[in-house]
Image (cartoon, rainbow, N blue to C red):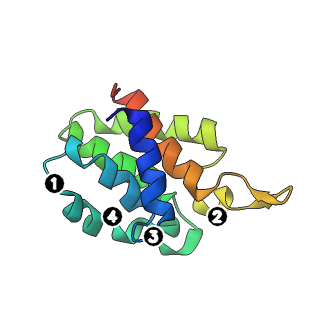
Amino acid sequence: MTIEERAEKAVELKTKGGYNCSQAVTAVLADQTDLSEEQLKQISAGFCAGMGNMEATCGALIGAGMIAGSKTEGIGTLKKTRQIQEAFMDRCGAIKCRDLKAITDGKPLCSCEDCVRNAVLIYGEVMKQK
């Protein structure tokens, strides 16, 4: 599955229910880790809505960082997650859920679906996944 297909699958998981933003990202990237999709779904459950209150970092972005940590086995992870975060900020306009969901001109800065899509795509770019 290409990274673009993974991104669309993550959006589908998020929109059809049963997966929050962080879970959708970790689920489609589960094969990048030694953990099962179900284990990742449990681990990432608390990272939706900016850690449950829309005040903190976007759950989709956290999910991408979690997978990067597993993929790098903790070596050089800070550099990779910083690259993911910077690219997410550039593409989405913010990293905090509250700011991403702020309504301007009748729509949010970046929808949950676009945050999920962008987190997967950016993970692919930074981690050189096709």
Which comes sooner in the sequence, label 1 or label 3? 3
The structure residue drawn at horizontal position 67% and vertical position 44%, both measured from the top left corner, is 93
Q: CA distance from mark 2 to mark 1?
A: 30 Å
Mark 2 surroundings: few (<14), some (14-19) or many (≥20) residues within 10 A: some
The structure residue drawn at horizontal position 42% and vertical position 52%, both measured from the top left corner, is 10
Between 109 and 1, the residue placed more toward the observer is 1
Q: Which residue is mark 1?
A: 35
Which comes sooner in the sequence, label 4 or label 3? 3
Q: CA distance from mark 2 to mark 3?
A: 21 Å
Q: CA distance from mark 4 to mark 3?
A: 15 Å
Q: Are marks 4 and 2 in contact (CB under 8 Å)?
A: no
The answer to whether residue 100 is visible is yes
Q: Which mark is residue 103?
A: none
The answer to whether residue 82 is visible is no
Q: Amino acid at mark 1?
A: Leu
Whole-percent x, y for residue 105 in the image: 86, 55
Whole-percent x, y for residue 112 in the image: 57, 58
Q: Which mark is residue 44?
A: 4
Q: Nearer the viewer, mark 1 or mark 3?
A: 3
Q: Secondary structure at mark 1?
A: loop
Q: Amino acid at mark 3?
A: Gly
